[in-house]
Amino acid sequence: MTGQVSRRQVCIIGAGPSGLLLGQLLARANVDALIIEAKRADYVLSRIRAGVLESGLTELLREAGCGERLDREGLVHHGFSLAFDDRTHRIDLSKLTGGKAVTVYGQTEVTRDLMEARAALGAPTVYEAEDVALHDFDTDRPRVTYRKDGVTHEIACDFIAGCDGFHGVSRRSVPERAITSFERVYAFGWLGLLADVPPASEELVYARHARGFALVSMRSRTRSRSYIQVPLADRVEDWPDDRFYDELRLRLPQDVAARVTPGPSIEKSIAPLRSFVAEPMRFGSLFLAGDAAHIVPPTGAKGLNLAASDVHYLSSGLIEYFAGGSRAGIDAYSQRALARIWKAERFSWWMTSMLHAFPDAGDFGARMQLAELDYIASSPAAATVVAENYVGLPF
């Protein structure tokens, strides 16, 4: 059965944080945007992802009308620690960056706030859309088709925003000759465990150890999120909770390890690590944003924040266009977004290279890592470079 053709100014593919944030900013500026999502709403909410927000993202969430719970429950962090050689060195973010900080607030909570805000505005989102397809985006009359409850729908629009992630349909719809991909796949992943226990540290601790990387993080004062580096061949089933906690303690400095509180896992998963960028990020009437265009290793806490910077550039360009007809913002979108993306890719790659065990690097590589960490610990200039990138470069 074929449904009626409808029209929107913008059709957003994907109801993850980037799609929802873009939709919310556009809706508040009276731009008519429909969001189309292949999964169920509860599935989108169930994905456990990032939890460290740059100030640029927190400001965007407030601008989108989603700052109330964030400001009430988010944990503002003014520093984090690097651990190596059984010692820790604190990076004082606020001191080194003129008062800037980051906020710990889970991506699940960001998504929930954006969903509720969109529902409050009565803005439309289609979940469980099947066979989503993008058409004619090389013209000024793009279309999106999808099937819902056995009925095929067609959306005519001015622009399409592809916010549907690395495996989504948006980037796959672009002809291979029109896009260039840059990628590095790492030979390990992060095994993450979420538990309702107090965090081992009031701030994040990134640990470099000969056995592999470890990170102690949190989602709240009573919910911990911890990670260890594992081979990609490992399975979650290979890591019962007791084994995970034993290995985590081995990789942490003794004082931090002593504060690790074991608790039954709420969620446990292995995430592979990769660096990836697709260029350009605009193809006629189609714009890519977030994971559809780039992936970073989680070491630098940049994934969600990079998606937010894309949304900042794209939303301002679209709002400018629909308000007064100027194409300056949308024409500059890809170049502006990529300039910031590559800097964040560099930082995430560098942090990953410095903190993880690379078996093929040998003793020389291990000594280089320790020398790099020791230099950061002893040089205010080097620590400032880390701090400036961690809190987020300006839009």
Image: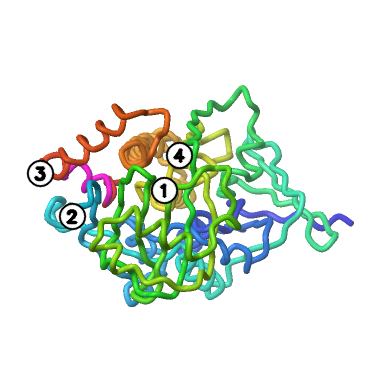
Amino acid at the residue labelled 1: Pro
- Of labels 3 and 1, earlier in sequence is 1
Q: Residue under circle 1?
A: 298
Q: Are marks 2 and 3 in contact (CB under 8 Å)?
A: no
- Of labels 4 and 1, earlier in sequence is 1
State the SS at label 3.
Answer: helix
How far from the left and from the top, in percent, is residue 39? Answer: 67, 59
Q: Residue at x 22, y 46 (%)?
A: 85
Predominant secondary structure, magenta span: helix
Q: Residue under circle 2?
A: 90
In the picture, the quarter occupied by the N terminus is bottom right
Q: Residue under circle 4?
A: 327
- Of labels 2 and 1, earlier in sequence is 2
Q: Is residue 260 visible?
A: yes
Q: Are marks 4 and 1 in contact (CB under 8 Å)?
A: no
State the SS at label 4.
Answer: loop
Q: Which mark is residue 380?
A: 3
Q: Residue at x 63, y 54 (%)?
A: 8
Q: Which mark is residue 71?
A: none
